[in-house]
Every structure is written in structure tokens, then in C-alpha cells.
Image (spheres, rainbow, N blue to C red):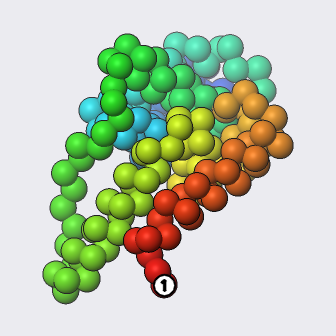
Amino acid sequence: MNAQSDEQLVDDLRLGLGSAFASLYERYKQGIYSFCLKLSADRFLAEDATHDTFIKMQQNIHTLNDVSVFRSWLYTIARNQVYKLLHKNKSNGRLTDDLVWSDDNPDIALEASEEREIIAQCISALKPEYREVLTLREYEQLSYTEIANITGNSESSVKSRLFKARQALAVKLKPFFKR
């Protein structure tokens, strides 16, 4: 059985089919959560923002005029929810996620974990507008056009912010990674 396209699922959701909501949720929940976590650096805020994103999606699906931009529209909602919750909570943006990594070699696992933590800390130290475009491009693999639609900026602005974010990260990470 072929998976339905986003366009088909959006049409079904507009008709009130709960299965369409469930399918869209399953398709996008991990990406939206990951984006919210990287943007907020707060596991609980990311969970709330993800939940709120899908509620807003269902409530406002009728306002989506061009179904072909559904993905960008959904990420825009997620972005807005994160900023709304950050503003509401006045979060300091520190990551409190206690993930457990498994690996056959504890030394390699520890080194990889330390590298990820260093990178995560440097990314979370970026200004939100730089962290946002970097996360959307590098982690969510969105196009410049999609990022521009989500952030409300021009593609050239997105490219400029990405360039600056990458440069800043390279400078900040250089002392840690001399390879």
C-alpha cells in the first residue's frame, strides 16, 4: 500500500478524518520535536511546543491555502510555538535532556558524547535567529526556500545567517577539534 501524500492527508484532515491527523502526526512528530528541542534547548518546552503545534495544525488547517507548502507551514507553527513558550517561560535555553548512549567501547562512547555536548552547547549559545536557520538546514534538511517561508525572511537573508552561524561555530569549535 502506498503512503498518502501530504496533500491527500491535508484534504482528508479538512474533511474531518481522524486517521489523516494520526498519519500526519506520525510522519512529522519526530522532526517537529527535534526542531523544537534544538531551537529551545529545553526538552519539556520542546514537548509542549510539539503538542501545541499539532493542535494548532488541526485547528487552522482550513487557513492553509497552498497545500504544497504544508511542511513549511507546519514548521512555521512549531517555530512560533517555541518562541511563544520561550517568551512565556523566559527560558534560559539550557538543555536538560538526559539521554543514554550505548556503544561497545565506553571510551569511544564518552568521547562522542563529549563532542556532541560541546557542539550542542555551542549551537545553543548562538542567537536564536542563527540557531534557527542552522537547525532547519542541517538537522531538518529543509531547503533555503522552505526556511525563508518558515522564518519570514528572504532566501538571501537565510543564506547569510547560515554562513555567519557556520563561521561562528567553526571559530568556537576550533579549540576543541584540532583534526
Tag 1: amino acid = Arg
Displayed quadrant of residue 12: top right
- Camera sees residue 2: no
Residue placed most toward the observer, 85 or 57: 85
Residue placed most toward the observer, 171 or 94: 171
Residue at 35 percent across and 19 percent down: it is 90
Residue at 78 percent across and 27 percent down: it is 66
Q: Whole-percent x and y of residue 107?
A: 19, 83
Displayed quadrant of residue 2: bottom right
- Camera sees residue 167: yes
* Left or right placement of residue 60 versus residue 149 in this view: left
Q: Whole-percent x and y of residue 175?
A: 44, 71
Q: Whole-percent x and y of residue 14?
A: 61, 19
Q: In the rendered picture of this protein, how many numbered marks are placed on residues? A: 1
Residue placed most toward the observer, 101 or 6: 101
Q: Judging from the image, what secondary structure is the residue with disc 1 in?
A: loop
Residue at 67 percent across and 51 percent down: it is 164
In this rendering, the answer to whether 1 lies above or below 148 is: below
Q: How many C-alpha atoms fall within 10 Å of the one at disc 1: few (<14), some, or many (≥20)?
A: few
* Left or right placement of residue 102 versus residue 12 in this view: left
Residue at 41 percent across and 31 percent down: it is 50
Q: Circle 1 is placed at which residue position?
A: 179
Indicate the quadrant containing the N terminus: top left, top right, bottom left or bottom right: bottom right
Displayed quadrant of residue 101: bottom left
In this rendering, the answer to whether 80 lies above or below 104 is: above
* Left or right placement of residue 108 versus residue 34 in this view: left
Q: Whole-percent x and y of residue 116?
A: 36, 64
